[in-house]
Image (tube, helix red, strand yellow):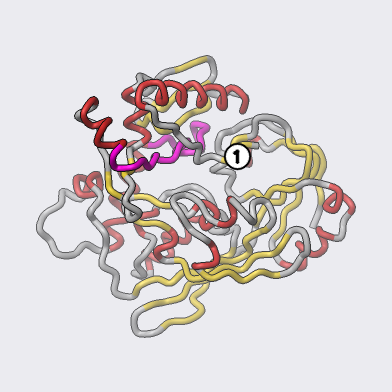
Amino acid sequence: MTIQKNISLKNLNTFKIDAYCDYFARVSNNDDFHELTATSEFLRSKKIILGGGSNMLFTKNFDGMVIKNEYAGINIIGEDEDVVFVKAGGGVVWDDLVSFSVRKNLGGIENLALIPGTAGAAPVQNIGAYGQELKDSFFSLEALNLETGNEIFLKKADCKFGYRTSIFKNELKNKTIVTHIILRLKKNPIPDVTYGGLKRELNYTDRSTYTIAEISDAIRKIREQKLPDPAVIGSAGSFFKNPEIKELQYLKLKEIFSDMPGYKTESGLVKIPAGWLIEQTGWKGKEIGNVATYSKQALVIINKGSATGSEVLEFSEKIKRSVIEKYGIALEKEVNIF
């Protein structure tokens, strides 16, 4: 384990923002972690954990320590007649874990194909797409407390999962490193094809079943068509959450904006597609300086090449103001701001 000083994070965040950190260390096992926690640099610095860097926006240099989670490995650790328990290191690329499950015909995360990031970051955000969320297949996780060095074991209920949130974005924010996650995947999966765009891509018929490989392949095609390749264009994927509002508020807005889409949630609220709101306020494909919204998906803010984090943040605030002025709905950032 080596501590590096004054390291550029440009190639470690998908927005490609050229920010620097005071200290940088890679951790791939508990011995590395405990060695790191004994150093003076660790003890005197504020800290953030870095996975794939896909949900972060650096608006300035980070005056602290960035710890890169590189815990590796994907293993089947148990099973019964119906389910298989799969354990993955926190540093595993999320899509590699999806591909592993699809190859084994284990259902539960196939709709989450091509989501950027790592397995350790997935529960922080409770990632979700196309009718699935991580919490649907999540069983437990192992983590280390950055303050005490103690191991933490959390079951699903302990994680307080919500829409794009968890205990790790609240009580345990920046206080842990997720070393391993354990998923409960189904041996006889029944794929979810209810999402409209997925139905169209599958050329949906009355077939009673699709394989999870067919589902995963279809979602990959959709995402590749709609979203920029982070290796080519800097972005963090969806910048904003889809807002959830009370049904009465939605019905009143619907009287004015008859084409406004809305989807009832389990909690009784109505979810409005943020991309639709942004597009309707004229921001789709709009450019200001080094920042723009992606021409194929208004929910994605992109770095045209040399944007600073502050420019991206200012651009996002202008979008928020436009949506509030027209619809009275406050968009909430999905991206973590540093």
Going by the numbered disc 1, the residue's amino acid type is Asn
Q: Is residue 174 left or right of residue 201?
A: right
* Quadrant into which the C terminus falls: top right
Residue 4 lies, with reference to residue 250, above or below; the image says: below
- Looking at the image, the residue that sits furthest to the top is 289
Tell me if residue 74 can be seen. no
Residue at image point 59% right, 55% down? 168
Kindly indicate the quadrant of the structure image that contains residue 279.
Answer: top left
Residue 247 lies, with reference to residue 167, above or below; the image says: above
- Image position, residue 337 (x, y; %): 61, 37
* Quadrant into which the N terminus falls: bottom right
Residue 235 lies, with reference to residue 186, above or below; the image says: above
Tell me if residue 217 can be seen. yes
Kindly indicate the quadrant of the structure image that contains residue 241.
Answer: top left
Q: Residues within 10 Å of mark 1 (few under 14, many from 20)?
A: many
- Looking at the image, the residue that sits furthest to the right is 40
Mark 1 residue element: loop
- Image position, residue 328 (x, y; %): 39, 27
Is 116 covered by the magenta stretch?
no
Residue at image point 29% right, 74% down? 188
- Looking at the image, the residue that sits furthest to the bottom is 81
Question: Which region of the structure is painted magenta?
Answer: 227-248
Q: Is residue 160 left or right of residue 4?
A: left
Q: From the viewer's side, name the closer residue of 231 and 124.
A: 124
Task: Name the residue carrying label 1.
Answer: 13
Residue at image point 58% right, 64% down? 89
